[in-house]
Image: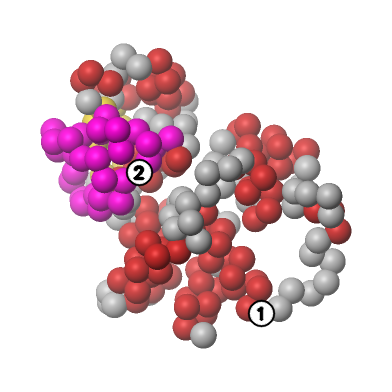
């Protein structure tokens, strides 16, 4: 599965969840709660196979975090090798990606924007520039927007909007200074994801 670069609205309608986690996309989903295309309203009338259900769940999670199949599978295999509940460990590894943390902190309005923001060198980790979206954030790491990037219009808009958003409990934020900290690894109950990770485990275990 290559990285999707088309309409996030169409992709969200296909998967049945708000992949961008934005109000704009949610409005489209509320207005057209069915798959895109000429026959979108007809799809799903039959009972899907067990394989199809598990495949769709895997696709939903990979697309939610904007990962291609190779990256996604490699991370799943790493999670399976770590002691603990595989599904929870997998979600925690996904949440610790730098592009996701930048999104959760509100420096970017979507994960797609966050990935681009990181890739262009606008993000610092503990004062050092990191331009790898998959970089794994550690407990205690300070994430900040580079000084020269703080005057960008959309960055200021995102920072202002983040003041009105509920901060994820595993993060600490200082939007006035464009900084935040990763204070702990999120527990499963912290993650309000519309995903059944057990289906993904079963998909890769088949």
Q: Which of 170/48 is in front?
A: 48
- x, y percent for residue 51: 63, 78
SS at mark 1? helix
SS at mark 2? helix
**Which corner quadrant of the image does residue 126 belong to?**
top left
Q: Which residues are magenta?
A: 113-142
Which residue was labeled with disc 2? 99
The number of numbered badges drawn on the structure is 2
The residue shown at (47%, 52%) is 3
Q: Which of 32/186 is in front?
A: 32
Q: Residues within 10 Å of mark 1 (few under 14, many from 20)?
A: few
Determine the residue located farthest toward the bottom in the rendered image: 206
Q: Residues within 10 Å of mark 2 (few under 14, many from 20)?
A: many
**Mark linked to residue 50:** 1
**Which corner quadrant of the image does residue 78 belong to?**
bottom left
The residue shown at (34%, 33%) is 117
In this picture, residue 73 sits left or right of residue 27: left
In this picture, residue 38 sits left or right of residue 125: right
Q: Is residue 114 magenta?
A: yes
**Mark linked to residue 40:** none
Q: Would you say residue 60 is visible in this rendering?
A: yes
The residue shown at (25%, 53%) is 136
């Amino acid at each position: 599965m290559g990285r999707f670069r088309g309409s996030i609205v169409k992709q969200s309608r296909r998967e049945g969840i708000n992949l961008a986690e934005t109000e704009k996309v949610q409005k489209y989903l509320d207005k057209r709660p069915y798959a895109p295309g000429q026959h979108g309203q007809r799809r799903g009338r039959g009972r899907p196979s067990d394989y199809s259900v598990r495949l769709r769940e895997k696709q939903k999670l990979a697309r939610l975090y904007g990962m291609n199949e190779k990256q996604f599978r490699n991370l799943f295999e790493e999670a399976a090798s770590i002691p603990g509940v595989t599904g929870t460990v997998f979600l925690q590894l996904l949440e610790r990606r730098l592009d996701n943390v930048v999104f959760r902190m509100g420096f970017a309005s979507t994960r797609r924007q966050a990935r681009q923001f990181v890739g262009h060198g606008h993000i610092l980790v503990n004062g050092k520039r990191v331009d790898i979206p998959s970089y794994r954030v550690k407990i205690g790491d300070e994430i900040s927007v580079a000084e020269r990037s703080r005057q960008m219009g959309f960055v200021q808009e995102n920072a202002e909007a983040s003041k009105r958003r509920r901060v994820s409990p595993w993060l600490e934020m200082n939007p006035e200074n464009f900084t935040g900290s990763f204070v702990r690894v999120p527990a499963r109950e912290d993650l309000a994801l519309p995903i059944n990770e057990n289906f993904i485990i079963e998909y890769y275990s088949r």
